[in-house]
Amino acid sequence: MWLYLHHTASDLIDLDPATGHWRPIDDAEKPPGAAVLADLPVKGGYTIENDKRYYSYWTPDEKFVFRSDDGAVFEICQKRGDGSVVMLPPVLRCEIAPSRYGDGRLRQGFSQFRLMDAATGQVLFELDYNAERYQRLYQSDFTAAAAEQDLSDWDFFIALQGAIEIFAERAASGRIAFAAEADGSAQVQGQRMRRDELLFADTGQKCPRSGIWACLTDLRVSVAVTQGEPMPSNGGRPEQWVWSRSD
């Protein structure tokens, strides 16, 4: 499976999850016309710490997993056919705290990442890593994309912690958020739609097509809107909507 280096969104590798072996992806292997990461069959990301690689990715059976350099695989959640999420046992949670030496002194610039059994508090995996370098990269990013990014776009472990928290919330609430597949298609309220069929509109924008529109943050919420009418809010909150079907 193809994965990208998290803090660069590039440097693609092909990981064999059965063996843990990987190889770099040559530009000649990329589909013709692929211009951005979303155009490629990428299933997750990786990072490198102390010359060791750590991975998070989606498996073919829609499980989201974290994999350590020694081959340990932690299954976090699984996406159901309707797009909802269920946490897999043992339910996991993350902690990230300042790293300390054995005598209790702070280890300047380093953080400790812990993956724990949420029910018992048992630590299943831990790693001390150089968090300061990601903070420096984040603070020195003055590109146009910087306005849309936060530290999780640089720090693999903060991103993983955030993902686990989001999945846990979705599993508890039943919320079904819009998610595009690697080929750009998506399932919207039970029907699979190709990338070129997807149509989006924001609250306040004139509706571009009559029909049933689903809320991107929770596809269970839908409204009927006529072309030319303003797109609604959701409970008073501005939202982005995706066209689902005709009335």
Image: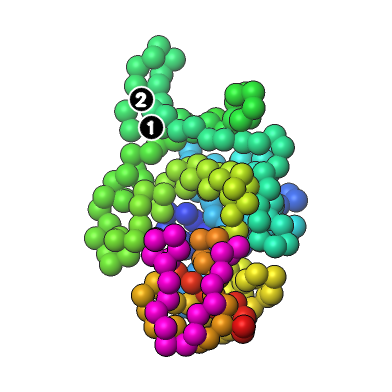
The residue that label 2 is drawn on is 107
Residue 199 or residue 162, whichever sits in front: 199
| Image coordinates for residue 108, horizontal then vertical, percent | 32, 28
Magenta run includes residue 211: no
Secondary structure, mark 2, is: strand
| Image coordinates for residue 67, horizontal then vertical, percent | 63, 44
Which quadrant, please, contains the C terminus? bottom right
Q: Which residues are magenta?
A: 219-239
Residue 61 or residue 101, whichever sits in front: 61
Question: Is 134 left or right of 220, judged from the image as shown?
Answer: left
Q: How was this image coloured?
A: rainbow
Could you tell me if the residues under marks 1 and 2 are in contact, i.e. CB atoms within 8 Å?
yes
Q: Residue at x 41, y 53 (%)?
A: 153
Residue 241 or residue 102, whichever sits in front: 241
User: Where is 75 relative to 97, above or below?
Assistant: below
Which quadrant, please, contains the N terminus? bottom right
Badge 1 crowding class, 10 Å Cα cut-off, few under 14, some 14 to 19, many 20 or more, is: some
User: Where is 229 relative to 7, above or below?
Assistant: below
Three-letter amino acid code at disc 1? Answer: Phe
User: Where is 82 relative to 101, above or below?
Assistant: below
Res 100 seen here = yes
The residue that label 1 is drawn on is 110
Q: Residue at x 49, y 72 (%)?
A: 241
Quadrant of residue 133 within the rendered picture? top left
Question: Is 146 left or right of 153, judged from the image as shown?
Answer: left
